[in-house]
Image (cartoon, coloured by chain):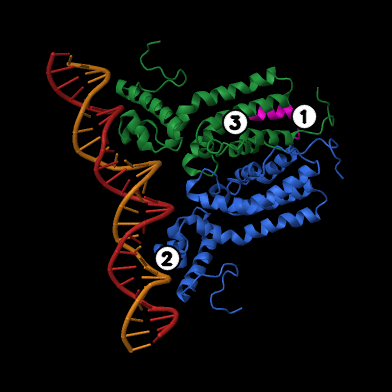
Chain colours: A blue, B green, C orange, D red
Amino acid sequence: MEDKNQDDAGQRAAPRKRADARRNEQALLDAAAAVFVRSGVQAPVRDIAAEAGVGMGTIYRHFPKRADLVIAVYRHQVEACAEAGPALLASASSPHAALRRWVQLFVDFLVTKHGLAGAMRYDDAGFADLHGYFLDRLLPVCAELLDAAVEAGEIEADLSALNLLHGIGNLCIGADKDPDYDAGRLVDLLVAGLRRPAGLAHSAP
Amino acid sequence: MEDKNQDDAGQRAAPRKRADARRNEQALLDAAAAVFVRSGVQAPVRDIAAEAGVGMGTIYRHFPKRADLVIAVYRHQVEACAEAGPALLASASSPHAALRRWVQLFVDFLVTKHGLAGAMRYDDAGFADLHGYFLDRLLPVCAELLDAAVEAGEIEADLSALNLLHGIGNLCIGADKDPDYDAGRLVDLLVAGLRRPAGLAHSAP
DNA sequence: TGTTGAGCGGAGCAAGGTTCCGTTTACCCA
DNA sequence: TGGGTAAACGGAACCTTGCTCCGCTCAACA
């Protein structure tokens, strides 16, 4: 456990960081998480630097783009969401039910992070990497759920996972700002609209 | 027709503008429209001033916020969309069909204006007025269509017009940037998901 | 303990929205 | 037609925000 430089069991080759560097990276992660909760994901970089008690240069040394910091802060939760996909598929009563529950999981995640959905927008150049990261991680999961539901004859096959994820992300924008806006309901309607009239091809259990 | 100062048959009391002021206002409107087509709605104010051949001060005299300029440019089309609602309700085969067609009209409008949907976001403070304008004009129309469909027993009553409009606006974000993203399809799914299983309460014609 | 380069801080740059204010000029009246 | 005046103009300047640059510091290792 108390190893020398063990952040990432994955890629060896990183030439061991200095202690102060590791300390600062962690401080930045903690500070960013706190600031994101307080002020939202679009909080100024300067605020985060101040909260962590480091200079601007330090932030950009560890996280070359603002998006990289955001990614790092939410990595664990994205990972958890990705892993929930196959699990739900195995445990839910049908692929469509699994899809529906997974989608709500994703919505809950997005909605609880002030402004994350907005920052993830496809057309936000500054956050292109964030967009890419979410897609890399979640697109295969979403596709698997979608395919399973198509396979089971529960939904039409004409919606790509990419479109669905995009749509969900978009629907969650602003959900944290307006208590009357119910992103979960809208997303659920969207997934419901996907459903075939019961008993067309195969039959649903 | 060649009146003295007749922009607005509505509110009297405006104390007659100078000729150069009227000329510049029109030039700005034209310039903004051109720039919006070329570079999108988020084009820098400076670009619009340059295109119109006026200074920054002039733009802000006529349109105190960037959003005011955007509103002015699209006012006609928003108006047309608003008026299409009752017309569709009168002509379509059912309220739900009317709703569906109206919604597609709105989607087409949003998608063809680079970045308009993005700028309209609820959580974009800079464009709060734009958001407000769209809502003022289109919310009653949407509510009317929704109510009619509920009345006819075609859809559930548990989705507010505000939520629906929000959702549609959100779904259209980025649609102009990514040719693979099909906002129209997603919105249609959403509206489809709203539909009651046929023949529940009243019966659909 | 001396050397050295990884790491640090923060001034500075660019971009974009908005404001300020000295100058210009359209319009009214004599 | 000639003045007077307030409306209108223009653009420099300001503020915020993301990101870069670079001289200084000090952790790590011999």
Q: In this view, does A14 lie above or below A189?
A: below
- Name the secondary structure under disc 3: helix
Report the residue at 69% width, 39% height from top: A159
Quadrant including the N terminus of chain B: top left
Q: Which chain carries label 1?
A: B
The answer, for residue A133, to whether it is visible in the render is: yes
Q: Is mark 2 on a helix, strand or loop?
A: helix
Mark 3 residue crowding within 10 angstroms, few (<14) / some (14–19) / many (20+): many
Q: Nearer the viewer, mark 3 or mark 1?
A: 3
Marks 3,1: beta carbons within 8 A: no
Residue type, label 1: Glu
Task: Identify the main secondary structure in magenta.
Answer: helix
Q: Mark 3 points at which residue?
A: B107
Give the numbered dot on residue B154: 1
Task: Identify the residue at horizontal 58%, vertical 69% (top origin).
Answer: A8
Q: Can you identify the residue that label 2 sits on?
A: A58
* Badge 2 amino acid: Thr
Q: Quadrant of the C terminus of chain B?
A: top right
Report crowding for label 1: few under 14, some 14 to 19, many 20 or more residues within 10 A (C-alpha).
many
Question: Which residues fall within the magenta stretch?
Answer: B137-156
Magenta region includes residue B132? no
Is residue A73 placed above or below B5 in the rendered structure? Answer: below
CB within 8 Å, label 1 to label 2 = no
